[in-house]
Image (cartoon, rainbow, N blue to C red):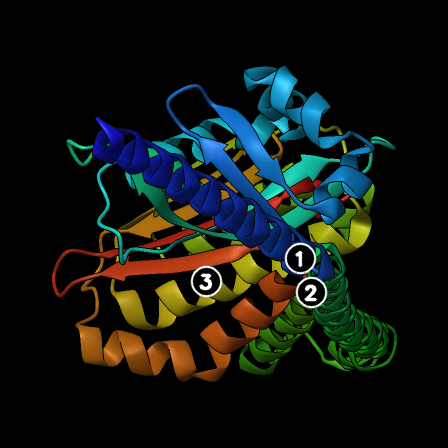
C-alpha cells in the first residue's frame, strides 16, 4: 500500500516536471519567435484556427493572440486578400497529404489593420499529427515582401515605358521619313508636270502634221509623264479619300495589263488620318506593282474592311506563287521590307501566304486606335 502511494506521488512529480519543462520550452520558443523579424503562426488545420502567433502578427493586424484564436476561420476570411483565398486554402489542403519533410512555399496577399494590401512569402510544414498520422497542426513562417514586389513592379514599369518610348521614337522616325518621301514625291511630280510636261507639250505643238511618228512618241511621253506624276502624288487620295484612290489605281494599273480585279471597301470611319491613308495607299501600290511584275496573274482581289477597332486588308492573286525560299528572300527584299516598315508605324501585322502555282495572299491588320 505504501509503495503504491509512493509510485503515485512519483508520477505526479514527473508530470509536474514535464509541465514545467513544456511551459519553459514554450516561453523560450515564444521569446525566440518574437525576436525573429518574420511572422510565425501555428494553425490547427482541423478547426482552421490560429493556435499560436508571434508579436509581428499581432502588430500587423492589431489583434491579440486570444482575439486571433477566438476568430477561428473568420481571421483568414478577414485578413487574406479575397483574390488569394482560394489558392491559400488549396495550399493548406495539399499539406494534409504531404510528408513531414515537405516544405510548401506560397506567395499571397493580406490586408493589414489599416486596409493596406501586403505581400507575404510563406513557408509551411506539418508540425503535429494524430496517432493515425493525420496532420493536425502546421507551422508557417512568413516574410513581408511588399517592398520587393513594389520595386519589381516599378522596375518592370520603367522597362515597359522605355520599350514603349523606343517604339514611339522609331515610329516618329519612320513617319518623318515617309513624310519627307511624300514631300519629295510631290516636288518631283510638280516638276514633271510643270516643266518637263510643258516642254513636251510645246514640242508637240511645234511639230507639223507630217511628223506622225514623232508626234506619237511625244504623245506617249506626255502620257507617261502624267502617269508618273499621278503615281507620285495621287490627287484623288487627298480630294476623295482612300476608297476612290485605291479603285482608281487598280483601274489604271490592272486594266492596262488586262488583269481583272474585284475591289471591296467597307470602312465605317468616314476618313482616316491622312498619313495613315497615304501609308495604306503606298502599301497597296507596292503590292500591285509586285503582282504586275512577278505574279503572272490574270485576276486580283483587294479587300479593305473594318472589323471592330481594326482595319483588315487583303490582296490575293491567281498567279504563279512563290516557294518558301523565294518567299523568305522576298521578305528581305526592298519592296516587302518597305511595306513592313510602313506597317510598323501603324503597329500593324503583315503576313504573306504563297505556294508555287497557287497564287499569293497578303494579309494585313492595322489597329484603328493607332491609326486615327
Q: Residue 142: tell me if it is visible.
A: no
Say which residue label 3 marks: 287
160 up-or-down from 316: above or below: below
| Camera-side mark, 2 or 1 | 1
Q: Position of residue 257 (x, y in %)?
A: 37, 59
Say which residue label 2 marks: 152
Q: Is residue 185 left or right of residue 21?
A: right
Secondary structure state at the residue bearing disc 3 = helix
Q: Is residue 289 left or right of residue 189?
A: left
Say which residue label 1 marks: 38
- Of residues 295 and 4, which is closer to you in this image? 4
- Of residues 107 and 160, which is closer to you in this image? 107
Q: Are marks 2 and 1 in contact (CB under 8 Å)?
A: no
User: Which quadrant of the view contains residue 9?
Assistant: top left
Disc sitting over residue 333 in the figure: none
Q: Give the total number of marks visible in the rendering.
A: 3
Q: How far is mark 2 from mark 1, CA to CA?
A: 21 Å
Query: Quick one: label 2, few (<14), some, or many (20+) residues within 10 Å?
Result: few
Quadrant housing the N terminus? top left
23 up-or-down from 220: above or below: above
Amino acid at each position: 500500500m505504501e509503495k503504491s502511494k509512493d509510485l503515485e506521488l512519483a508520477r505526479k512529480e514527473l508530470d509536474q516536471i514535464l509541465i514545467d519543462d513544456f511551459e519553459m520550452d514554450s516561453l523560450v520558443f515564444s521569446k525566440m519567435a518574437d525576436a525573429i523579424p518574420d511572422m510565425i503562426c501555428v494553425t490547427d488545420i482541423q478547426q482552421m484556427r490560429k493556435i499560436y502567433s508571434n508579436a509581428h502578427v499581432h502588430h500587423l493586424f492589431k489583434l491579440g493572440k486570444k482575439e486571433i484564436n477566438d476568430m477561428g476561420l473568420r481571421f483568414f476570411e478577414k485578413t487574406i486578400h479575397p483574390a488569394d483565398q482560394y489558392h491559400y486554402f488549396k495550399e493548406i489542403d495539399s499539406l494534409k497529404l504531404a510528408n513531414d519533410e515537405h516544405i510548401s512555399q506560397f506567395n499571397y496577399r493580406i490586408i493589414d489593420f489599416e486596409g493596406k494590401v501586403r505581400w507575404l512569402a510563406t513557408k509551411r510544414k506539418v508540425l503535429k499529427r494524430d496517432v493515425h498520422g493525420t496532420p493536425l497542426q502546421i507551422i508557417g513562417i512568413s516574410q513581408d515582401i511588399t517592398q520587393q514586389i513594389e520595386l519589381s513592379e516599378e522596375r518592370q514599369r520603367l522597362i515597359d515605358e522605355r520599350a514603349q518610348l523606343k517604339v514611339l521614337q522609331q515610329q516618329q522616325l519612320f513617319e518623318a521619313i515617309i513624310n519627307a518621301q511624300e514631300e519629295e514625291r510631290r516636288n518631283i511630280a510638280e516638276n514633271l508636270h510643270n516643266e518637263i510636261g510643258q516642254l513636251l507639250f510645246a514640242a508637240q505643238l511645234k511639230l507639223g502634221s507630217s511628223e506622225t511618228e514623232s508626234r506619237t512618241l511625244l504623245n506617249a511621253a506626255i502620257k507617261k509623264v502624267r502617269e508618273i506624276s499621278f503615281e507620285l502624288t495621287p490627287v484623288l487620295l487627298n480630294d476623295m479619300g482612300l476608297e476612290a484612290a485605291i479603285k482608281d489605281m487598280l483601274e489604271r494599273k490592272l486594266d492596262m495589263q488586262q488583269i481583272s480585279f474585284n475591289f471591296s471597301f467597307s470602312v465605317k470611319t468616314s476618313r482616316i488620318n491622312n498619313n495613315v491613308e497615304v501609308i495604306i495607299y503606298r502599301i497597296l501600290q507596292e503590292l500591285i506593282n509586285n503582282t504586275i511584275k512577278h505574279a503572272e496573274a490574270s485576276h486580283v482581289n483587294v479587300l479593305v474592311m473594318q472589323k471592330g477597332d481594326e482595319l483588315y486588308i487583303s490582296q490575293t492573286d491567281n498567279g504563279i506563287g512563290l516557294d518558301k525560299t523565294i518567299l523568305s528572300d522576298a521578305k528581305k527584299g526592298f519592296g516587302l521590307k518597305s511595306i513592313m516598315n510602313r506597317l510598323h508605324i501603324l503597329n500593324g501585322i503583315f503576313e504573306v501566304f504563297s505556294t508555287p502555282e497557287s497564287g499569293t495572299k497578303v494579309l494585313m491588320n492595322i489597329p484603328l486606335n493607332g491609326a486615327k
